[in-house]
Image (cartoon, rainbow, N blue to C red):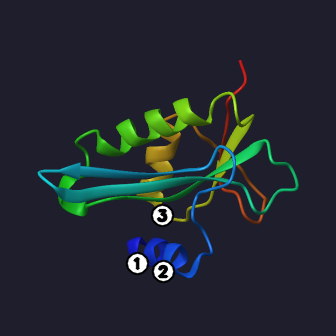
Amino acid sequence: MVTRLIDEWSAGENRFDQPGERSYVVTINNQVCAVAGLNIDPFMSDDAVGRVRRLYVSSALRRRGIGSAVMQRLVRDATGRFDRLHLRTRDANACAFYEAVGFTPVAGVEHCTHRRSLIG
């Protein structure tokens, strides 16, 4: 997943440089331990929908609150710019994580398995 993030950045496919988009890097002792991104959802025709992209926490550092902290910051940054956030994952552990941080499972939507409202 990190390789794909780097490849997309290098190729100019995704630089997280549109209005409201951001990329996140977490370091501990000068070592990257987590990455994530926030995009305008490219699968929607509504630029008020954001998309959580490429959240990855080093397997050695999981379950220490790093992913939750990244998501808290991402949601804070997205609020006011986006009405809702979408994401897609098929990993059971990732599903449980996203649901624990406020996302709701979505069925029958091709590019979205979870969403979270940022209104109200």
Residue at position x 81%, y 48% in the image: 47
User: Callout 3 environment at 10 Å: few (<14), some (14 to 19), or many (20+)?
Assistant: few
Q: Which residue is mark 3?
A: 91
Front position in the image: 111 or 104: 111
Residue 56 horizontal side relative to residue 114, left or right: left
Q: Which mark is residue 31?
A: none
- At label 1, the amino acid type is Thr
Residue at position x 20%, y 53% in the image: 61
Of the image marks 2 and 3, the number of the one nearer the N terminus? 2
Q: Of helix, strand and loop, which one carries label 3? A: loop
Q: Of helix, strand and loop, which one carries label 2? A: helix
Vertical arrangement, residue 89 with respect to residue 95, above or below: below
Vertical arrangement, residue 64 with respect to residue 72, above or below: below
Q: Which mark is residue 7?
A: 2
Of the image marks 1 and 3, the number of the one nearer the N terminus? 1
Rendering coords of residue 3 (x, y %): 40, 78
User: Callout 1 environment at 10 Å: few (<14), some (14 to 19), or many (20+)?
Assistant: few
| Mark-to-mark CA distance, 2 and 3 | 22 Å
Front position in the image: 38 or 85: 38
Confirm or deny contact between disc 1 and disc 2 (CB under 8 A): yes
- Which numbered disc, 1 or 3, marks the residue closer to the eye? 1
Q: Which residue is mark 1?
A: 3
| Mark-to-mark CA distance, 1 and 3 | 18 Å
- At label 3, the amino acid type is Asp
Front position in the image: 108 or 70: 70
| Mark-to-mark CA distance, 1 and 2 | 6 Å
Rendering coords of residue 23 (x, y %): 48, 53
- At label 2, the amino acid type is Asp
Q: Which quarter of the rendering shows the C terminus? A: top right
Q: Of helix, strand and loop, which one carries label 1? A: helix
- Give residue 57's quadrant in the image: bottom left
